[in-house]
Image (cartoon, rainbow, N blue to C red):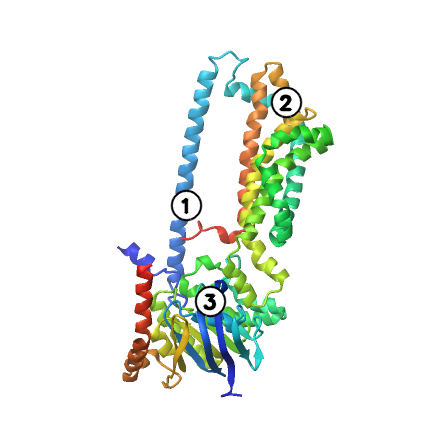
Amino acid sequence: MSVTQAEGRVQPNSPYSTDSDISAEQQAARDRAKAQQRKSMAANLGIRIVSLVIVLGGWEYFGRQVNPVLFTYPTAVGAAAIKMIGSGELWQYLSQSLIVLGAGLALAVVFGIALGVIMARYWVIDIALDTYITALYSIPSVALVPVLVLWIGFETSAKIAVVFLFTFFPMVINTYQGVKNVDTRLLEVGRAFRCSERQLWANIILPAALPFIVAGLRLSIGRGLIGMVLADLYTAITGIGYLISRYASIYRTDAMFVPVVTLGVLGITLTGLLRIIERWVTPWMHYSDRD
Amino acid sequence: MPDGVKIIVDHASKLFLEGSVVAFRNIDLEIRSKEVLCVVGPSGCGKTTLLRCIGGLLAPSSGKVLIDGQAVDQPREGVAIVFQHFGLLPWKTVAENVAFGLQMAGVSRQLIKERTDRYTKLVGLENFEAQYPYQLSGGMQQRVGLARALAINPDILLMDEPFASVDAQTREVLQEELLQLHDRERRTMLFITHSIDEAIVLGDRIAVMTTRPGRVKEILPIDFKRPRDPAAVRSHPHYAELRNHIWNELRPTVLEGAYERHSS
């Protein structure tokens, strides 16, 4: 009962409150909320660990009963990983792929956002290009890789072009959608306060489009990873794709799984990184810090 | 010109969708300098559209809107709008939202800071400057909307049902605060509402609008002295009389609207 009363006095919408001990109660409420949050985070972590133990344990048990040429098990992969990391082999090939991913993604972000904005701003360009954008986005990007090889060759620039092809369209389409979805009421507010067009873009349209752009980036990261490995396999065989195909061809399944698992870890890392970026660029989108 | 006419609506009509929807027709209205003119009417009478035409956000289909004798064809300097939907920018903090109009006008950083501080304090939000709109209640969000409008120091304040989307108690508090603000700094104010009570409490005059097509049926002077105490106004015998009178004017069109919506 006393708890309810205490919380009742910490209503956020009482700007005139002069109660001197209210800050202590607010602090208490904040601490409670934090403790609650810590508790649920601990629970999530616990569930993840138990799940990981079961999955790895099962894999270990059943993996050991299969011919090592066909399948492998976690301790073998771990041993191979230690060897490949220690010798610098993993990083040597992974870094080649990461450069390709980074360059392709960066180009796609810059040009994708630019084209999305231009299409949303100028209706002539929108009408002129939207069919091609939709068509190219619909074609499975893999189908175009041989064409790219024909045009650009096998080297790093061709690989970057493949990643670009995989990541460019989600950026264009999401940016375009973001700009087009701006709340017309906010545009009216901008007009009422006599915004110039430049001010309208800087203060209203681009901030409103930002969550869409970040969503596009999330899509692009997933597709970019696919493009990166495909580029390694379909052009000059280098990078992490080379590691996979070489160890597969000499039946070293355990070593082959090292780059495969690395790709999974890379996906988790990049998604986590994106979440941090998201919190930083769109702080108004987060409702979780409410008490 | 203390008693001069600030805004003239001259025989204005507004039609939408190639003429198939008539928002309002042949409206003549004068808003005097420093007065509060409340426009009261049921939904669909075109009162919000009228405000948009005066604010320069829409152009009337025929007729004219004049401010200080000049035709309005775009949002003018010195005119601020408070919106029913608040219209706060979600990505800006309270202080940044209040500063918005000043920033767009390109005034000096120091003046922005001064005015922003002053008006956030005036509406009681001095401890919430770093918050984002989603962290505030509806009543507080509209206080930000009001501070943003006042910060550009407008001669004309256009209020588009500003308190319609906050709860009844907050609404009365905001009405009181608006009365106090108006006593402190008089501005020409057009206040759109569908609440007869609100119009009587706030207005110097009330324009009663009816529907289909929207037109001004009557203009009533409200003689309660300023500074006004809303509670005293509401308990005054003249209040009930006014309220009944306006309601009798509006009731036929409100009922008509209800039936039409029901049958369609």
Asked if both marks, 3 and 1, belong to the same chain, the answer given is no
> Please, what is the three-letter code of the amino acid marked with disc 3?
Phe
The quadrant holding residue A235 is top right
Q: Is residue B65 left or right of residue B124?
A: right
Q: Please give the chain letter of the residue carrying mark 3.
A: B
Q: Please give the chain letter of the residue carrying mark 1.
A: A
Q: Residues within 10 Å of mark 2 (few under 14, many from 20)?
A: many
Q: In front of the other: label 2 or label 3?
A: 3
Q: How far apart are labels 1 and 2 at the CA level?
A: 42 Å
Q: How far apart are labels 2 and 3 at the CA level?
A: 61 Å
Are dots 3 and 1 in contact, CB under 8 Å? no
> Please, what is the three-letter code of the amino acid marked with disc 1?
Gln
Mark 1 vs 2, N-terminal side = 1
Seen at 40% across and 41% down, the residue is A40
The quadrant holding residue B36 is bottom left
Q: Please give the chain letter of the residue carrying mark 2.
A: A
Q: Residues within 10 Å of mark 1 (few under 14, many from 20)?
A: some
Residue B62 in view, yes or no: yes
Circle on res. A243 = 2
Q: In front of the other: label 1 or label 2?
A: 2
The one nearer the camera, A38 or B257, is: B257
Circle on res. A37 = 1
Seen at 59% across and 25% down, the residue is A259
Q: Position of residue B70 (x, y in %)?
A: 58, 79
Q: In front of the other: label 3 or label 1?
A: 3
Asked if both marks, 2 and 3, belong to the same chain, the answer given is no
The quadrant holding residue B256 is bottom left
For the N terminus of chain A, give its image quadrant: bottom left
Q: Is residue B41 above or below residue A214?
A: below
Circle on res. B83 = 3
